[in-house]
Image (tube, rainbow, N blue to C red):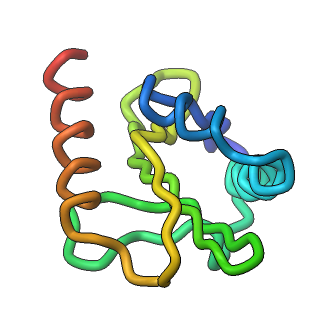
Amino acid sequence: MENEKPIKVIFLKSAEEFIGKLDEKARNKLFKAMRKTQARIYGHWFKKLKGTNGIYEFRIDEGSKFYRLFAFWNKEGKTETLIIGTHGIAKKTNKTPVNEIQKAERLKQEYFDNK
């Protein structure tokens, strides 16, 4: 599709802080997942969370840890489509805590309310 706007990933402050705390290997894996998504290559590393109001997560595994960076789309831009990273978590199981999903939904609502 030639008329598609480029995809750009940006971060809220809490997402930047999360990424800054990752070790280099995990951070590189996360950025690789973002580059693939920006190139419109979709896979298990970027997935919509079921039962949410448009919340997605970048998913990476590093050793026995699971990392999730929550995000949502903003397709309103005239020149580009944004994926906004809200915040991230490190966890030991593959289950995503409901309170973290709710936090992502709240941050998404605040983002659009403040636009």
Residue 16 x, y percent position in the rendering: 55, 29
Taking 84 as reference, is 32 above or below it? below
Farthest top residue in view: 115
Quarter holding residue 67: bottom right
* Residue displayed at 76% across by 76% down: 63
Residue 86 visible to an observer of this rendering = yes
Q: Nearer the viewer, residue 61 or 77?
A: 61
From the image, which quarter does the N terminus lie in?
Answer: bottom right
Residue 1 visible to an observer of this rendering = no
Residue 52 x, y percent position in the rendering: 22, 67
Q: How many marks?
A: 0
Q: Nearer the viewer, residue 38 or 5?
A: 38
Left or right: residue 71 compared with residue 108: right
From the image, which quarter does the C terminus lie in?
Answer: top left
Taking 88 as reference, is 14 above or below it? above
Residue 94 x, y percent position in the rendering: 48, 83
* Residue displayed at 50% across by 41% down: 83
Quarter holding residue 10: top right
Residue 5 x, y percent position in the rendering: 61, 36
Left or right: residue 38 compared with residue 103: right
Left or right: residue 11 compared with residue 87: right
Q: Nearer the viewer, residue 55 or 5?
A: 55
Left or right: residue 39 compared with residue 50: right
* Residue displayed at 14% across by 23% down: 113
